[in-house]
Image (cartoon, rainbow, N blue to C red):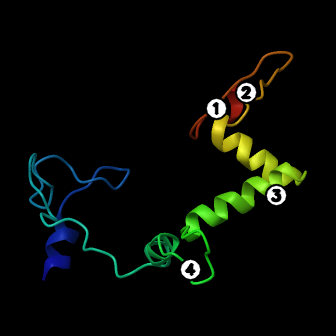
Amino acid sequence: MIEEKIANIERDKRGKFLPGNPTRIKPGQVLNPKGRPPKDVSLTSLLKEQLEQIPEHSKQGKTWRQLIVEAWMWGALKGNPILLRELVERIDGRVVQPIAALGEIVFVIGRGYENQV
């Protein structure tokens, strides 16, 4: 029934509905007032909970998060280049690398410009 009504509504040559069609969303109309339903427990949320726990073997009472950060820092200090780069990037941010180009650059977005480049 609904499919028949939608099929009979006139569209433009691109397939978009013409103004005045009854299926168009009205300004201010909300189709999903409650929003997205909450997710089930995800791996990320479980990991975040676990990171705040104190493991049984922790002699100083440090959380998993603290132990991981310490191990990361010790690894960087011992010369592990991957850990060192990650540590620096998280502290100072990624280094921006400038891009240089010689000549004219033309950016084309969309279709219909194939012959103009």
Point out the residue furthest to the top here: 103
Which kind of residue does numbered mark 3 sit on? Gly
Q: Quadrant of the C terminus?
A: top right
Q: Residue at x 79, y 25 (%)?
A: 99
Disc number for residue 117? 2
Callout 2 environment at 10 Å: few (<14), some (14 to 19), or many (20+)?
A: few
Disc number for residue 55? 4
Sequence-first disc among 1 and 4: 4
Residue 110 as seen in the image, left or right of residue 101: left
Disc number for residue 2? none
The front one of 101 and 51 is 51
Sequence-first disc among 3 and 4: 4
Sequence-first disc among 2 and 4: 4
How far apart are labels 2 and 4 at the CA level?
Answer: 62 Å
Sequence-first disc among 1 and 3: 3
Q: Residue at x 20, y 78 (%)?
A: 3
Task: Kindly state the secondary structure of the residue where label 4 is placed.
Answer: loop
Q: Percent from the top left, x then y, of residue 112?
A: 59, 37
How far apart are labels 1 and 3 at the CA level?
Answer: 46 Å
Q: Quadrant of the N terminus?
A: bottom left
Residue labelled with disc 3: 75
Q: Percent from the top left, x then y, of residue 50?
A: 49, 77
Which kind of residue does numbered mark 2 sit on? Val
How far apart are labels 1 and 2 at the CA level?
Answer: 8 Å
Sequence-first disc among 1 and 2: 1
How far apart are labels 3 and 4 at the CA level?
Answer: 21 Å
Residue labelled with disc 1: 108
Task: Kindly state the secondary structure of the residue where label 2 is placed.
Answer: loop
How far apart are labels 1 and 4 at the CA level?
Answer: 56 Å
Asked if residue 13 is positioned above or below residue 117 in the image, the reply reads: below
Q: Are marks 2 and 3 in contact (CB under 8 Å)?
A: no
Q: Residue at x 61, y 75 (%)?
A: 58
